[in-house]
Amino acid sequence: MSERFAPSLPLHAVPLKDLRRTPIRLNPDSVPRATPVLQDRLHRPLRDLRISVTDRCNFRCAYCMPKEVFDKDYAYLPHAALLSFEEITRIARQFLACGVRKIRLTGGEPLLRKNLEELIAMLAALRTPDGQPPELTLTTNGSLLARKAQALKAAGLQRVTVSLDALDDDVFRHMNDVDFPVSDVLQGIAAAQDAGLAEGAGLKVNMVVKRSSNLHEVLPMARHFRGSGVTLRFIEYMDVGATNGWRMDEVVPSAELLSLLKSEFALQALAPDIPGATAQRWAYVDELGRPDPDLGEIGFISSVTQAFCRDCNRARLSTEGQLYLCLFAHQGHDLRSLLRGGASDAELAGAIDQLWQGRSDRYSELRAHQSPASEVAEDGGRRIEMSYIGG
């Protein structure tokens, strides 16, 4: 596959994905690692692996895959470039050996990947060094969830996060930019609940809030999901990639959203449920001011105004086997070449060790010292697109 570069061109002319790869040169001295817990240079453990299974999506949300760039002529990755389910499983096994405990499948839209439930079953059969199965989750736009939920649950999927940015049908159709009805996504959420994917607060809805597009939908969304068994989380509009036209004045800070929600609902802050959690949790409270489990909770993911880099324990694997150590990275590390070049499991694990121990990424923390919406790194590389690496 020829590599696609993104030179400094006007937005409408940018060839998207910067897929420049860093060859991985194995260092035998790094295997095994010196400490029992794999940590990066900022002492962050590796716990979460996000795997993109496709670079395709059937929505054209402006903050992720704007239609003027991802048009009918856009060249997606050829099938031969994608990691097979067997290759994904083999890499995931080595990540579990290196400390990963949670695997999230993303895209693009992951449910567009044919027979995805087979991959879920393969991953569900894996075990950590202490014999525990990994936590398996999936992020989806919900468009295909109604027909897939039962099979996903049966295959071993434990949790689902649905991206939904509005309840008003006109607003939702405008934001997805393919005229897809909100009713079909709501049916998918209901199907996930019926399949048992909401057990243990396993079903979440993520709403990206963009000031000019859907701020007025925040309270209707909260009213709808309050007491439904679904956790609603509000995400600050992020400067991911090079094509979404990000501007700071379109970001609605979580503090502003919290104030808006408190104007109608009684809320109480909750402690993080897991180390490295990205969302700040708030519970709906009862008339005595106590968190009410029946009403549930909401969350805020504030990577623009309240960076959580220092607790970030996530690595990202692209659909063609490039390992990215930050959502805002501009360069990947080529695990696929190791896989297809005959590397042993020990060499794969050693490569993961090397890369994570050398990691020092903290883009969001440094954002305040960079030019607004800077999309170009010092070496000229453009940040990778969210549609390619997953959220």
Image: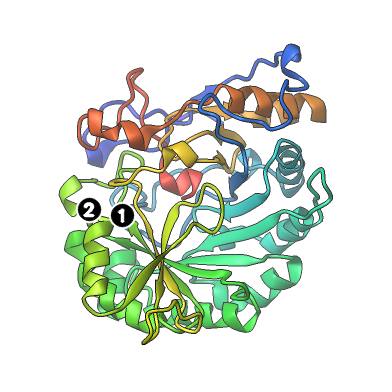
User: Pointer 1: what residue?
Assistant: 236
Quarter-of-image position of residue 185: bottom left
Identify residue type, mark 2.
Val
Q: Nearer the viewer, residue 371 or 115?
A: 371
Give the distance between the C-alpha atoms of the residues marked 2 and 1, in whole angstroms: 6 Å
Asked whether the viewer can see residue 167, the reply is no
Residue 251 bears which disc, if any?
2
Residue 211 bears which disc, if any?
none
- Residue drawn 37% across the image and 25% down it: 381
Looking at the rendered structure, the secondary structure element under dot 2 is loop
Q: Nearer the viewer, residue 359 or 294?
A: 294
Quarter-of-image position of residue 361: top left
Looking at the rendered structure, the secondary structure element under dot 1 is strand
Identify residue type, mark 1.
Glu
Q: Residue 353: horizontal and vertical position, in percent? A: 67, 26
Q: Residue 243: horizontal and vertical position, in percent? A: 30, 43
